[in-house]
Amino acid sequence: MLTGVILAGGHNRRMGGQNKALLSFPNERLIERQIRIMRQNCDEIIVVSNEPRTLLPILKDTVRIITDYISGKGPLSGMHAAFSLSKNPYLWVVGCGMPYICPNAADLLWKHKKDLRCDAIIPFVGNQLHPLHGIYHKSCSSVISKLLELECDQYKVHELFNNIYYETLSESLFAAQNIDLKFLINIHSPEDYKQILRTSHTFI
């Protein structure tokens, strides 16, 4: 089966300290929306947060809420913790600021990953890699652990791909399945959030 991972451990500096996971959408918070969508694919969901006390009253025991083993080193720290504790070999990783995560996109990535027998498969859209919304094998945790031990910038997420066997899925393959590429949208600022609320009249 598949484990869903929501990385919610950032400091939200560009949001002025506002927690992206708790942004309001119609009838639910963003993280509640993500969990609801992920349940279509995942029998386990892990939320990685450096503020678990903020999320516990909202999520209660519906998901596993964990913290970084090795803190202060960005998304790789959260990935390392989730990969280490996942009960499943495959993990679908998203950021907490992504309102349009797509189960069909995740399923397409997962199927290709199993066929290709790679360590990870991620979208390649707009001539760039998109590590978030990728599917990873939990064995990547050992590689991440080594990167986190380095006293340099090697813990940047993209450095992971210099150390594992990964494949990509192009935008044409998503388009062939009628999958809207908005699943890659990530809220970084209050302006991003306002723009999404203005342009999206219906949330499913």
Image: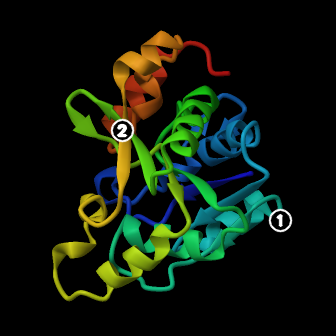
Name the residue beneath numbered marker 2.
168
Q: Amino acid at mark 1?
A: Asp
**In the foreground, 160 or 156:** 160
Q: Which mark is residue 190?
A: none
Residue 110 coordinates in the image, percent (x, y): 58, 40
**Residue at figure coordinates x 39%, y 65% from the top left:** 75
Mark pair 2, 1: CA separation: 34 Å
User: Residue 61 shows which numbered tag?
Assistant: 1
Quarter of the C terminus within the rendering: top right
Asked which secondary structure carries label 1, the reply is: loop
Q: Could you tell me residue 137's position as x and y percent?
A: 54, 60
Q: Amino acid at mark 2?
A: Thr
Give the side of residue 149 with respect to residue 80, left or right. left
Report crowding for label 1: few under 14, some 14 to 19, many 20 or more residues within 10 A (C-alpha): few
Instruction: Answer with left or right where residue 127 lies relative to residue 8.
Output: left
Q: Residue furthest right?
A: 61
Q: Residue at x 82, y 58 (%)?
A: 62
Mark 2 or mark 1: name the one nearer the start of the chain. Answer: 1
